[in-house]
Image (tube, grey):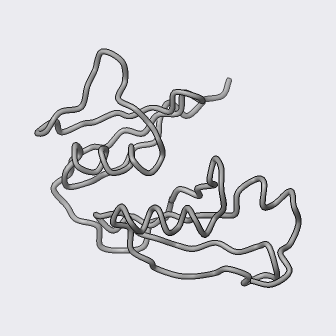
Amino acid sequence: MTSFISHTAVDCANAYELSEWWKQVLGYVDVEGDPNLPGHEECLITDAETGHQILFIEVPDTKVAKNRLHFDLRPRSGTRDNEIARVRGLGATEVGDHRGRFGPGTGWVVLADPEGNEFCILRSEGEVAAGPPAAE
């Protein structure tokens, strides 16, 4: 017997606000028939394409150290750098720039959401398929 991941849970200070922010980043939506509203202590969002779900749960403690688990995001279309700019425009902050760290085409940028949870943005599948860029 084995298990499967039901959803990914994210502890946070404000479940509604953080779920709304991540919906903009990921294009996820509220679960049909269960809308997230201000004041909800648990907010579930889902990817309409894949069914993956993220549950934001309010907890009393604040984030104090680096995440042991984080999201690695790949743009659905466009480029890594365009997606980094878009997500920065939504309020993400840069934690580390590792573009080209292990050679051309291996780069990523570490960002943090409004509550400080780190995540990475990788090159898109199209960029990876095209091979290493001439220069990064």
Residue 99 percent across, percent down from the top left: 67, 80
Residue 55 percent across, percent down from the top left: 36, 38
Rendered residue at 11%/39% (across/down): 39
* Vertical arrangement, residue 37 with respect to residue 1, above or below: below
Q: Nearer the viewer, residue 86 or 125?
A: 86
Rendered residue at 78%/61% (across/down): 127
Residue 49 percent across, percent down from the top left: 58, 28
Q: Nearer the viewer, residue 15 or 80?
A: 80
Residue 45, quarter of picture? top left
Rendered residue at 65%/56% (across/down): 78
* Vertical arrangement, residue 111 with respect to residue 96, above or below: above
Q: Which quadrant, please, contains the N terminus?
A: top right
* Vertical arrangement, residue 66 with respect to residue 44, above or below: below
Horizontally, is 2 left or right of 36 in the view? right
Residue 47 percent across, percent down from the top left: 50, 33
Residue 61, quarter of picture? bottom left
Residue 124, quarter of picture? bottom right
Residue at the left extreme of this rendering:
39
Rendered residue at 24%/31% (across/down): 36
**Count of numbered marks:** 0
Horizontally, is 126 left or right of 8 in the view? right
Q: Which quadrant, please, contains the C terminus?
A: bottom right
